[in-house]
Image (tube, helix red, strand yellow):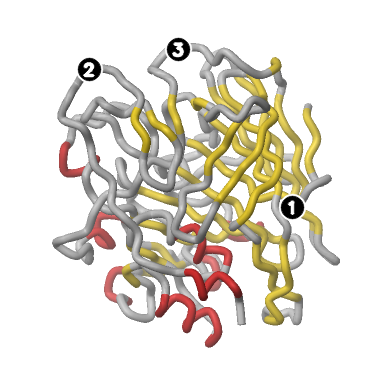
């Protein structure tokens, strides 16, 4: 049995301080955050004047990232995107929405056990996916989430005929959000953010990063390159710009390369390839790319329901640029600085 399922529990909700004056506070189990302002979205640190959006529950959508799934919809609207290895050298995207919406979003694919430690730190998020093995289904049933997947909620999904059938299942965040329980809570902050426009005081200038997800038959190659004009890290995959369905290249404000170990779950996919699980409870090395710099640091996650904390060489929380963040769950030795 997989270890993560044994440590699941209820997640605490987020909340704001009514004092609008700047200060540094701490979220239980998570990073310190300069979030005394009550108009900031918890997962981006950006101003979100819509009270309903910034106080709603998180929504996770598992987005296909196989070559035939591109271009995806919704990847530029997500607050946070986590790239995880799912089989061979193929990756899948764990997209977290909270302060924004996407119509459509997808293509939507199956769940993986790596997701369990991720959803557990989001305070009972909505979880959208399509397809699951019997073992993973049991883990999802025990996890602190609201299942809005295709099997339980098929009416909110549709097929996009212009795509191959396996890579064609779509939905909208608005439809999925209608399944939110009335007592659902917003997620805790996942990162510390600098004030809007404030430069980072640590790190070395960086042009970008090159990451390889290597399997027996397939290798997915990811590159991020700093674009000073937009203040973003432009993403490419397999030597081509990584664009969404609208033709806009993905360019997050922050990129976190979190070096992890992947263990064999004992399961295999349709091609008889082993299905791995990222070990996310513990600690390890991390490279944090923000504001044209890279900060070499560490990550630490004390338990499944705890937020992962990213710290610099002195042990201080690394402050990110307000905006979207992509996390790459990479194997140590699979990345190099550009």
The number of discs equals 3
Instruction: Say which quadrant the N terminus sits in.
Output: bottom right
Q: Residues within 10 Å of mark 1 (few under 14, many from 20)?
A: many
Residue 125 appearing in the image: no
Closer to the camera: disc 2 or disc 1?
2
Identify residue for label 3. Answer: 198
Identify residue for label 1. Answer: 220
Residue 89's disc is none
Observer-nearest residue: 64 or 18?
18
Q: Earlier in the sequence, mark 2 or mark 1?
A: 2
Q: Does 115 appear above or below 57?
A: below
C-alpha distance separating marks 1 and 3: 34 Å
Closer to the camera: disc 3 or disc 2?
2
Observer-nearest residue: 252 or 259?
259
Q: Earlier in the sequence, mark 1 or mark 3?
A: 3
Identify the residue at image location x=16%, y=60%: 183
Q: Position of residue 333 (x, y in %)?
A: 83, 45
């Amino acid at each position: 049995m997989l270890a993560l399922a044994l440590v699941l529990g209820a997640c605490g909700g987020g909340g704001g301080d009514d004092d609008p004056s700047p200060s540094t506070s701490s979220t239980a189990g998570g990073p310190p955050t300069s979030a005394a302002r009550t108009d900031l979205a918890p997962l981006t640190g950006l101003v979100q004047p819509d009270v309903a959006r910034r106080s709603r529950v998180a929504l996770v959508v598992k987005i296909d990232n196989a070559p035939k799934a591109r271009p995806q919809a919704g990847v530029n609207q997500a607050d946070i995107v986590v790239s995880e290895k799912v089989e061979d050298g193929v990756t899948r995207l764990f997209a977290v929405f909270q302060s924004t919406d996407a119509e459509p979003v997808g293509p939507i694919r199956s769940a993986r056990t790596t997701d369990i430690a991720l959803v557990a730190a989001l305070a009972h998020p909505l979880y959208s996916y399509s397809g699951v093995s019997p073992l993973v289904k049991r883990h999802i049933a025990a996890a602190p989430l609201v299942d809005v997947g295709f099997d339980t909620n098929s009416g909110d999904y549709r097929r996009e005929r212009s795509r191959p059938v396996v890579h064609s299942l779509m939905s909208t965040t608005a439809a999925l959000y209608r399944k939110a329980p009335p007592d659902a809570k917003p997620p805790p902050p996942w990162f510390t953010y600098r004030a809007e426009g404030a430069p980072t005081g640590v790190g070395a200038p960086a042009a970008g990063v090159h990451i390889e997800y290597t399997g027996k038959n397939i290798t997915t190659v990811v590159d991020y390159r700093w674009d000073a004009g937009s203040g973003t890290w432009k993403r490419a995959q397999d030597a081509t710009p990584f664009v969404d369905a609208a033709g806009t290249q993905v360019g997050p404000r922050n990129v976190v390369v979190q070096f992890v170990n992947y263990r064999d779950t004992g399961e295999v996919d349709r091609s008889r390839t082993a299905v791995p699980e990222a070990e996310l409870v513990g600690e390890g090395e991390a490279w944090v790319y923000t504001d044209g710099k890279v900060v070499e640091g560490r990550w630490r996650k004390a338990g499944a329901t705890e937020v992962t904390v990213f710290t610099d060489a002195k042990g201080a929380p690394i402050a990110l640029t307000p905006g979207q963040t992509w996390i790459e769950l990479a194997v140590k030795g699979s990345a190099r600085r550009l």
